[in-house]
Image (cartoon, coloured by chain):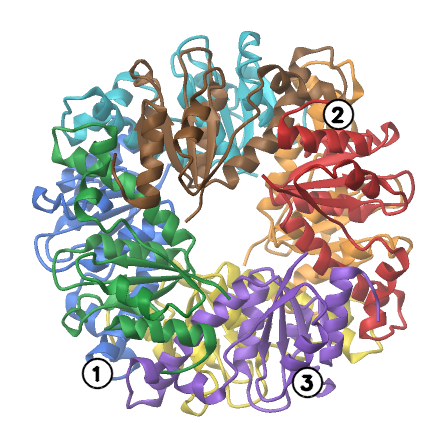
Chain colours: A green, B blue, C yellow, D purple, E orange, F cyan, G red, H brown
């Protein structure tokens, strides 16, 4: 049983690397958005030409990134969405809603501070965790039925 | 042509009332989440019994509210999502992602301050506006082909 | 907002009548399986001819009842499944699984004795209740946003 | 023609092993729920933290198990559901309903005692059998067109 | 509960009239193909111009009739397909396959002589009957739960 | 049988009016894009603010018009697409492809000059005609089974 | 580009072998129903026990065969349906309708005698041919763009 | 992450070769329509027999080509549609609409002269470019997150 996992959300800490490393023995594939913040912001104008207005600069980039993120979510068995400590992170919540509407198994990761404002997102999830290790524990249990 | 509109997002200002009033001559129906903040937070435990933990208190309420919000989005032709000035509003972004994945026509309303963090949500929309009047102008154009 | 409700499960008590009566002021429609136990068991052979084997007697009836139950579930916004105190009630659990796979909002009603064996069914539900009154409280909240 | 088979239901006898062994020469893959009863019951709290209430203890576990069972059913060509002699087994009937709603080919296995209460489940199946050997006979016929 | 019924198949006897008359007290709507044999054969060329080849004469007509038959099947809750004593009736079997693939409730009506060659069609049906009265008995049972 | 018809394509002649007038006795509803050329071109900037670049001026308008056209196509039973004598009319071909992918019954109307370049569009249609009267003849036949 | 082909219909001549042999150089896979007539008729009772009534004997077999045929059609890119000179062949027409409803590319093969009664089936097809060689010519053209 | 790309549209320049060559280091597969103009026009009659009328000559060919083009679009993650300088190219716009309705990621390539008449097609795209190199830049960014 190969599981395809999409790792959405916060891009400023190494949580994806922690999960990938700890899951090295599992039969899983990981996909994620482009995590290079500058490339992600500027990809649209870098390839398709500059814009005077910030709105269209961002629009071009966001649509280009959508090619990758939608592919990742649509082909995933499990979508993990992490909310970090900073920023609005509305794209993370958007991805969670997108995944939920497609019937994907959703795992949400966040600290206790965000519990109340994330209650709708958490309620749509099959698991709510705080750490990368818990994500890997879940993947290992789903694959092999073994507990930590 | 009757259009079913779902008005998602911010619940602390009267934007829904403004839209509904200004659209009184249109062939539209409006649905929205429960906008009574306290009722929305406490509905789960009020009906199904108290919980010691805030997480389950919120989980019960969020799932109950999901009965209404999913019905509203799934039956909508157009989903309008407003982001206000305050709070995390992750449920608004979640609704936008949910609507986008279902292929609904999405209109996003927010002020210029939120432009950059909402770029992925805006890019998934067919229209991005700032005021309730613009939403009604769009609905009137879609219905009758007339411009303001 | 008209809500279509399908009332599945136990047919030996008057819980459907209680819900219907208490919801008389709501904008809802109710559908349910045929609740005449003998008619439900014998409908197939009564219309399409007798069978020697109990298996085919039951098969004819179950397929005929499926015309009604699938129509009811497929057209429902909310599926309520009640598990009573007696019998195997595998058809109730089957209906719950059928409704869950179609993405219907699921409300499960049962007493505390059945909590553990129904844990998978409960986990697929947006609300788990014990009484008909709680179902009506939920419907009223979903419709009007008012709490009991 | 590779067939993906999901083996749902009773976990206290070795029927899955019997099927897997007897089907060793077929081009099939088998998936199943976690069949370690204790792990299955406790997985949620073991990974995501203890709960005081049995309901939430079970809810966490059931949702975690749903990641695996839904993946198994959604990716299956054929879903085999076995009902044993003991327990309520509502999750087995739930899986059968879930598979039926997705249009999966359903094979139901049970003894003659359960014929009447399983009539709705049986009627949704393409085959109703009593033994693991019959399941393998069906798989071999579907693959190679050969009869026992 | 309004049931939409599509009456497919044989067009040379008055079975549709019999059903419609006997179902006058039910909350049902009936649709059917064009049953004027000559109009059905010639509609394409009558509206869109003559063809030298019989193949294209028929192709134009069949595609035009498909506008009505597909609409009828797609909007039906129940599809009744009758096989008469004469002709190839491949369009009836085609409609049955089309309805089955869409998950429609299928009722097949035919005499005992056709039992063996129709076994695959019958197996896809929820009811197999011989007379229009049996169809109405089924519709009445599905609507009201009453037996003849 | 009410038929919902979407009239796509060329907006510079009165073909829609001809169809609507000639179909006055039929049980049909008609929808169409906004046919005021200037309003259609400028709607985006008129409501959401001016753009320096023609590309974004057009992008805003096209997305706004998409709210109406997608609603029209998605809710149609039959999509009629007319290609006139002038302009590129790529939006007409786009609508035809969109309708074909959704499985809508497609009627294409154009003069003989366009036969070869429209061969792929015609091949996806259930009827290819030259005049508004032929469209109405088809609608009348589909509704009543009567030929002109 | 690997193409999955399902070869449905007549089982009394070697047309499948002709296609398979002539397509040996193509990147295609072929699936088909069980073509051993006796095994196909008796598979149900051979595995699941005898029936007194011919109807249930056939029902058991037809449902078992449906596991294979539905898998074959659902996983096919192209469904080829051949109508031979003899028998009712309603299962072939049923398969054609089933494939059409799923949006599969349909190729129908039959002699000129069957043209008129197969007009609805032919009209749903993307190609109508008379010989196995024509099927292979089509597959080769689809794969490589080369004509015979 | 393997990306399946379908290259639709103009067949008279070597833009497909340029993309394929420049993307040699990427994990992508490319499919396209038959680009031999004569074979594409005549395939239907070459395999299935001559037609007197140009309409049916073209109809046979267009339906045959549809087997390949629909397979290509349906199995694509990304659909690139190029509009060249000449011809009506309605099949390109049809493919774009078809891909949009299926929710495919759409990239449109054309020169500035076509901007206004392609505004509806462009608005449905996630990227609008002018050169093959820009397409490859996008694919490389989607795969590896690197910018040119």
In the figure, H16 relative to B69: above or below? Answer: above
Residue E94 x, y percent position in the rendering: 73, 43
Q: Residue B53 shows which numbered tag?
A: 1
Chain of residue at mark 2: E
Q: Which of D140/G127 is in front? A: D140
In the figure, H44 relative to C57: above or below? Answer: above
Q: Distance between the residues labelled 3 and 1?
A: 42 Å
Q: What element carries label 3?
A: helix
Q: Which of G30/B147 is in front? A: G30
Name the residue carrying label 3.
D114
Q: Which of C82/H122 is in front? A: H122
Chain of residue at mark 3: D
Few, some or many C-alpha atoms within 10 Å of disc 2 (few <14, some 14-19, many ≥20)? Answer: many
In the figure, D10 relative to G34: above or below? Answer: below
Q: Is residue F66 left or right of residue D36?
A: left
Residue B91 x, y percent position in the rendering: 23, 59
Q: Is residue E57 left or right of residue G78?
A: right
Residue H84 x, y percent position in the rendering: 41, 16
Quarter of the image for the C terminus of chain A: give it. bottom left
Q: Residue sitting at 64 percent across and 81 percent down?
A: D17
Chain of residue at mark 1: B
Name the residue carrying label 2.
E58
Q: Tell me if label 1 and label 2 are in contact, CB under 8 Å.
A: no
For the residues tagged 2 and 3, is the chain the same? no
């Amino acid at each position: 049983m190969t599981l395809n996992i999409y790792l959405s959300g916060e891009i400023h800490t190494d949580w994806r690397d922690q999960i990938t490393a700890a899951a090295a023995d599992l039969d899983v594939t990981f996909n994620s958005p482009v995590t290079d913040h500058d490339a992600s912001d500027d990809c649209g104008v870098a390839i398709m030409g500059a814009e005077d207005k910030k709105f269209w600069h961002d629009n071009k980039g966001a649509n280009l990134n959508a090619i990758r993120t939608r592919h990742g979510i649509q082909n995933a068995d499990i979508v993990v969405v992490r909310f970090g400590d900073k920023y609005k992170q509305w794209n993370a919540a958007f991805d969670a809603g997108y995944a939920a509407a497609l019937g994907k198994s959703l795992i949400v990761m966040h600290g206790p501070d965000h519990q109340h404002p994330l209650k709708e997102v958490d309620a749509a999830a099959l698991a709510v965790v705080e750490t990368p290790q818990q994500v890997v524990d879940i993947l290992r249990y789903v694959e092999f039925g073994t507990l930590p």
